[in-house]
Image (spheres, rainbow, N blue to C red):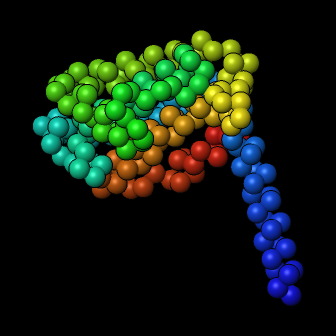
């Protein structure tokens, strides 16, 4: 009886691993990516407008981060994404940055002295550059291998990371603003992959 039970679970695990391998190597039309990027940015811009201008550099919206710091964080990762598109691989981290947490701190710290307006402008300009790079890629490039051949991933999957990143922060910002949750079917990356 226990052996049958364990065998059922093993079947589930094998099926799960098979599904994950497909998602790790996801491919799809770049038009879907571009539309997703545009929609996620429209949603984030709409949420930003709900934060009064005099609170954008003082009101915590993500842990202790203010809206300015949250956008600085997003900009930092989108710059990293752009570097990855140019190199076709995971770019090196800046000097002194060793992991995700220190990269987050670095992205915020490098923009700390900038005005809200400068961060807001960079937030828009960086996304514009990222979307233009995606538009410039051929469909073959988007579906092609990205990064280390030992850990194959597609460019499509690389680009989904940054789209999902903003969707996650939009959902968190909604919570900080006491707005209703974003319906989960709109924030799941699997909806874009299928």
Give the residue at x 34% y 54%: 175
> On the image, which quarter does residue 144 sit in?
top right
Front residue (pair 65, 174): 65
Give the residue at x 74% y 45%: 21
Q: Give x and y (percent) for residue 57.
A: 17, 37
Answer whether residue 95 is visible to the viewer in this image: yes
As drawn, which residue projects farthest toward the left?
A: 54
Front residue (pair 170, 65): 65
Front residue (pair 94, 3): 94
Give the residue at x 35% y 40%: 102
59 displayed left or right of 188: left
Front residue (pair 28, 64): 64
In the image, residue 43 above or below residue 29: below
Q: Give x and y (percent) for residue 54.
A: 12, 37
> On the image, which quarter does residue 73 sit in?
top left
Q: Give x and y (percent) for residue 44.
A: 38, 36
As drawn, which residue projects farthest toward the bottom?
A: 1
Q: Give x and y (percent) for residue 127.
A: 43, 23
Answer whether residue 75 is visible to the viewer in this image: no
Give the residue at x 64% y 40%: 192
* Quadrant position of the C terminus in the picture: top right
């Amino acid at each position: 009886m226990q052996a049958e039970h364990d065998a059922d679970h093993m079947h589930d695990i094998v099926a799960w691993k098979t599904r994950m391998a497909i998602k790790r190597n996801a491919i799809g039309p770049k038009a879907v990516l571009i539309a997703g990027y545009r929609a996620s940015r429209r949603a984030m811009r709409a949420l930003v407008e709900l934060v009064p201008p005099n609170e954008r550099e003082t009101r915590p919206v993500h842990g202790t981060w203010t809206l300015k710091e949250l956008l600085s964080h997003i900009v930092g990762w989108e710059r990293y994404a752009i570097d990855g598109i140019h190199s076709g691989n995971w770019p090196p981290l800046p000097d002194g940055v060793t992991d995700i947490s220190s990269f987050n701190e670095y992205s915020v710290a490098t923009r700390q002295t900038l005005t809200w307006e400068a961060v807001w402008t960079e937030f828009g300009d960086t996304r514009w550059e990222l979307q233009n790079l995606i538009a410039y890629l051929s469909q073959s490039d988007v579906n092609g291998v990205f990064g280390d051949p030992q850990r194959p991933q597609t460019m499509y999957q690389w680009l989904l990371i940054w789209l999902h990143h903003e969707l996650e922060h939009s959902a968190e910002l909604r919570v900080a603003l006491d707005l209703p949750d974003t319906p989960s079917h709109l924030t799941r990356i699997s909806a874009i992959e299928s």
